[in-house]
């Protein structure tokens, strides 16, 4: 049984030890954002370069001007090109996700350093498996969340008809919180499915006679282990997942609010760096969540079928087949030998003196005197 550890701290340790995976992901996300901003910049320049409304953006922040600009972004040939590029960025982001996330999870579960070549190589190996996991996530989430969204809409209409003011706000907010909590449970579950998908790929399927063993690519075989792990550790994993989610969103909201107050300043670099700091913290908390889920999966691993089971051995077994205790051999019992108890040997009589005559010192007899 693996040693039980604090998954919160162990997840942070995994994230820091595999920090290059986070840095590469941030770099590619920033590159995609920069490419997307080129089309957006052309759209904004087409609308604002010859408009007096742009003055309200140079001297401050006018929400009405921003809203009006957003409504006219699609106008003209430049706007159509920007929209097409924006639609193209979504598949690029998904391809980036399918390449970097499996490699990151692989490095988290092994001692492999998080080099870019390793991330891309493992991403290519797990690409179609993660595509299947994503489709399965969308399908199951739609089945569960669609009725809840419908009920939330009915609840909001009921509140609007019968309640106003603060009570109506909190009533609708409560429904949205319920949706958020259900969605967070689904996200946590399918994160565990992704972790177990990489872990199962490290196992070898039982090979057929005459054929080499192959890695296990069965995605459906990870659903049950992920469910058991989530059910048995729900009170530990879910609060940590929620805390890191709220922490990431709070960092983005705080930095975005601060950046909004810096819009009227002539220097753009501090505002850009502050906004990127919030996005980096949010990405860091997401990788921390991945580390927590990996630590939880490593403490509850999928049994490896390629390893022979260790069965208890009781009594004498056949040395040719020791893993099957029912194939026991009958050993002939050795005869019991009763030990014989010998009587103690008494002290022997003193030996007869070998002298020709008695010792005068012992018998006090003078042989020169005639016997009377």
Image: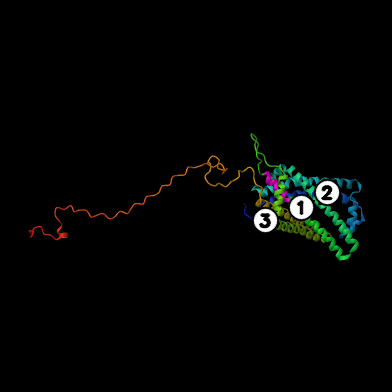
- What is the number of the mark on residue 339? none
Please give the residue where the numbered disc 1 appears in the rendered image: 186
Left/right of residue 363 with respect to residue 49 in the rendered view = left
Frontmost of labels 2 and 1 is 1
Q: Could you say where residue 299 lies in the image, as x and y percent from the top left?
A: 65, 52
- Depth check: give the residue in front, 57 or 190: 190
Q: Main secondary structure of the magenta part?
A: helix
The alpha-carbon separation of the residues under discs 1 and 3 comes to: 19 Å
Q: Earlier in the sequence, mark 1 or mark 3?
A: 3
| Tag 3 residue | 7
Q: Secondary structure at mark 3?
A: helix
Which callout, 2 or 3, points to the residue nearer the camera? 3
Q: Is residue 164 magenta?
A: no
Q: Can residue 38 be seen by looking at this rendering?
A: yes
Does residue 200 belong to the magenta stretch? Answer: yes
How many residues crowd mark 1 within 10 Å: few (<14), some (14–19), many (20+)?
some
Q: Residue furthest bottom?
A: 166
Q: Of residues 308 and 241, which is closer to you in this image?
A: 308
Q: Is disc 1 placed on a helix, strand or loop?
A: helix
Give the mark, 2 or 3, whose residue is nearer the N terminus: 3
Few, some or many residues within 10 Å of mark 2 (<14, 14–19, 20+)? few
Residue 73 relative to residue 272: left or right: right
Q: CA distance from mark 2 to mark 1?
A: 35 Å
Part of the protein shown in magenta: 191-201
- Asked whether disc 1 touches disc 3, contact meaning CB atoms under 8 Å apart, the reply is no
């Amino acid at each position: 049984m693996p040693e039980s550890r604090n998954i919160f701290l162990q997840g942070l340790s995994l994230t820091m030890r595999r920090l290059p995976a986070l840095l590469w992901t941030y770099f590619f996300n920033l590159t995609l954002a920069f490419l997307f901003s080129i089309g957006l910049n052309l759209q904004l320049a087409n609308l604002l370069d010859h408009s007096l409304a742009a003055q309200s953006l140079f001297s401050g922040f006018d929400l009405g001007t921003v809203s009006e600009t957003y409504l006219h972004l699609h106008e003209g040939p430049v706007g159509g090109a920007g929209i097409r590029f924006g639609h193209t960025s979504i598949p690029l982001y998904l391809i980036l996700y399918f390449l970097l996330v499996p490699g990151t999870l692989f490095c988290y579960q092994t001692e492999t350093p998080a080099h870019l070549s390793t991330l891309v190589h493992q991403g290519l190996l797990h690409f179609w498996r993660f595509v299947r996991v994503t489709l399965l996530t969308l399908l199951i989430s739609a089945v569960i969340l669609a009725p809840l969204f419908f009920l939330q809409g009915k609840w909001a209409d009921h509140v609007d008809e019968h309640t106003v003011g603060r009570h109506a706000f909190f009533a609708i907010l409560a429904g949205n919180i319920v949706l958020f909590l259900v969605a967070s449970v689904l996200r946590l579950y399918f994160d565990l499915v992704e972790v177990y998908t990489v872990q199962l790929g490290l196992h070898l399927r039982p090979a057929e006679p005459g054929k080499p063993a192959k890695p296990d690519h069965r995605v459906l075989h990870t659903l049950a282990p992920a469910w058991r792990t989530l059910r048995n550790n729900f009170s530990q994993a879910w609060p940590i997942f929620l805390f890191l989610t709220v922490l990431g969103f709070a960092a983005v909201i705080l930095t975005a609010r601060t950046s909004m107050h810096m819009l009227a300043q002539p220097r753009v670099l501090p505002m850009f760096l502050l906004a990127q700091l919030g996005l980096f913290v949010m990405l860091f908390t997401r990788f921390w969540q991945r580390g927590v889920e990996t630590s939880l999966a490593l403490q509850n691993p999928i049994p490896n079928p390629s390893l022979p089971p260790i069965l208890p051995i009781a009594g004498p077994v056949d040395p040719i087949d020791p893993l099957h205790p029912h194939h026991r051999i009958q050993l002939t019992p050795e005869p019991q030998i009763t030990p014989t108890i010998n009587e103690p040997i008494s002290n022997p009589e003193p030996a007869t003196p070998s002298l020709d005559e008695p010792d005068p010192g012992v018998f006090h007899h003078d042989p020169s005197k005639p016997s009377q």
